[in-house]
Amino acid sequence: MTSFPTHHSPLTTHHPLYEEVIIAGFGGQGVILLGKLLAQAAMKNGHEVTYMPSYGAEVRGGTAHCMIIIADELIASPLVAQPDAVITMNEASYKKFATRVKTGGLLVLNSSMVTGHEPLDTVDVVAVPADDIAVELGSPKSANMVALGAYLQKRGLIEPTAAAQYLSDVLAPRYHKTIPVNEQALLRGAEFVRSN
């Protein structure tokens, strides 16, 4: 009688990628753009992707956010309740979303803006001074890219250099002149994680 390996066999064990992400900040910090770039880069790298931005009154001064799911299989719903990872760009978004991260998940926070964060034992916290690094680069608005670079480096799903290739896809043509500094910001965020 021939026996076949079951799905528990080490030879066939495979954990398909299924990463739920929330990116949050206040209007003007480019969180919607970050979501678009992450979604585009993941899609171009062969993954299934959903992307759901939160527009409306929240974007004008309150907490703006978007939900991204990256998977190797079809995605049933774009809604994210308990994300595997959260990127928070300001204090309000930290307070709103930090406690939603799954146990063992990742929280990337902009320590230039989130000053009073408490240690979270159940998740991996990466505190990156995104605004400070962006100012060093001469482009304060690139803080969002610093944070994304840190997330990409920590997670290893997509290379920061690969994500940078798709900036022209998500930026309006009038902002294409900012692509070089945004690319630098992505790489500096990744470098921060590698060196800490």
Image (cartoon, rainbow, N blue to C red):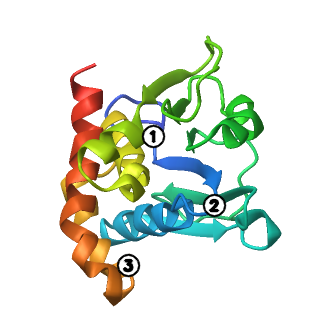
In the rendered structure, which disc, 1 or 3, sits on the residue that comes first in sequence? Answer: 1
The residue mark sitting in front, 1 or 3, is 3
Q: In terms of depth relative to the viewer, which is nearer, 13 or 91? A: 91
Q: In terms of depth relative to the viewer, which is nearer, 137 or 83? A: 137
Estimate the spatial distance between the alpha carbons at disc 1 and disc 3, rounded to whole Å: 33 Å
Residue type, label 3: Leu
Q: Position of residue 93 (x, y in %)?
A: 69, 43
Residue type, label 1: His
Q: Which residue is mark 1?
A: 15
Q: Residue at x 64, y 23 (%)?
A: 103
Residue type, label 2: Cys
What SS does tag 3 mark? loop
- Drawn side of residue 43 relative to residue 53, left or right: left
Q: Which residue is mark 2?
A: 66
Total marks shown come to 3
Q: Position of residue 64 (x, y in %)?
A: 68, 59
Q: Which residue is mark 3?
A: 171
Q: Are marks 2 and 1 in contact (CB under 8 Å)?
A: no
Q: Is residue 174 above or below residue 108?
A: below
Q: Find residue 28 and report its image quarter.
A: bottom right
> In which quadrant will I find the C terminus?
top left
- Drawn side of residue 17 relative to residue 84, left or right: left
Q: In terms of depth relative to the viewer, which is nearer, 114 or 74? A: 114
Question: Is residue 1 something one can see in this rendering?
Answer: no
Q: Is residue 76 above or below residue 144?
A: below
The residue mark sitting in front, 2 or 1, is 2
